[in-house]
Amino acid sequence: MNFSGLIHNFGPLTVTGLAQGAIIALFALGYTLVYGVLRLINFAHSEVFLLGTYASIIVWGFFGLDQNSPTPGMFAVIGLIILGMVAAVVASGVTAIGVELIAYRPLRRRNAPKLAFLITAIGASLAISETVGVITGRNIRGVPRLIRQTDVVVIGNTHITNLQILIVVLALVMMFLLDRFINRSRLGRGIRAVAQNPDSAALMGVNQGRVISLVFLLGGLMAGIAAVMYNLKIGVTRFDAGFLLGIEAFTAAVLGGIGNLRGALLGGLLLGVLQNYGAGLFGTEWLHAVSFVLLVVILLFRPTGLLGESLGRARA
């Protein structure tokens, strides 16, 4: 164990972890939204994210940009990022709705056991991933370098870049907007009603089918934003890019309290930081293992996660 390395690089590891954790947190919102309403895990959510990464790259390719292109000017970058986000959220949102219509709704109408939903979600995940793999030849796809990373804040050996700030701020803004939507809007009240008691919500005129489609859509939109941030940060994607990150996002959702929006944000940021601390202490090869071990330890003492509050019990 390298305690001196961890202490010396504490600042850089923390900043890098927060940026990574912000992406994980946005990704985790899809898991926690669906679980909060259906009490089911949508394991196809990783491919909802995956298609968002490809959609933004395809749009940027329309402008002749690839991984070898020089960084465009500032105003062009802003427009390209916005266009990439629009493409990603549309692709991810449509995919999420498609998963609900094809894989979930027929099973709900037949009152299928929860195991059937789990198997179907895994099947949908593999089908989408393998289809993308066949289309892309299982090759890595590079991302245009839209943002030239520059230091904005420097404290000792801690360098905070413009891209890291963008990722964290965007995650916080999207989380705030989603939280306000769930807790303040009419549609949000419907989501909370179904999450708390679907039978009572139906008697009050809430359309459960529309609510379920809405939470899938919202989760897809958050995954699309996360996909663009992932592209800008990592710089490459491939057909199985959503697999490991999807496991991490699911871990973050459980860590913060599955079904809790704020818990997903807390869990994602905490997981990203803990992963980097683990990498600094034990080596980069332990980056993922350490975070999952810590998850088990935390759940031994907090089985419902750190916050443990479901959508149905969210404050109005």
Image (tube, rainbow, N blue to C red):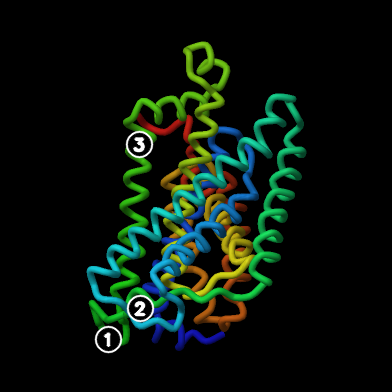
Give whichever of discs 2 and 3 has the lower sequence position.
Answer: 2
On the image, numbered disc 2 is attached to which residue?
11
In the image, residue 88 above or below residue 68? above
Are the residues tagged 2 and 3 within 8 Å (C-beta)? no
Please give the label number shown on residue 156.
Answer: 1
Are the residues tagged 2 and 1 within 8 Å (C-beta)? yes
Residue 278 in view, yes or no: yes
Residue 277 in view, yes or no: no
On the image, numbered disc 3 is attached to which residue?
181
Q: Amino acid at mark 2?
A: Gly
Q: Quadrant of residue 16?
A: bottom left
In the picture, the quarter occupied by the C terminus is: top left
In the image, residue 168 above or below residue 157? above
Please give the label number shown on residue 106.
Answer: none
Give whichever of discs 2 and 1 has the lower sequence position.
Answer: 2
Give the x, y percent position of residue 15: 37, 73
Judge from the rendering whether residue 58 lies leftward or rightward of residue 160; answer left or right.
right
Give the x, y percent position of residue 303: 59, 46
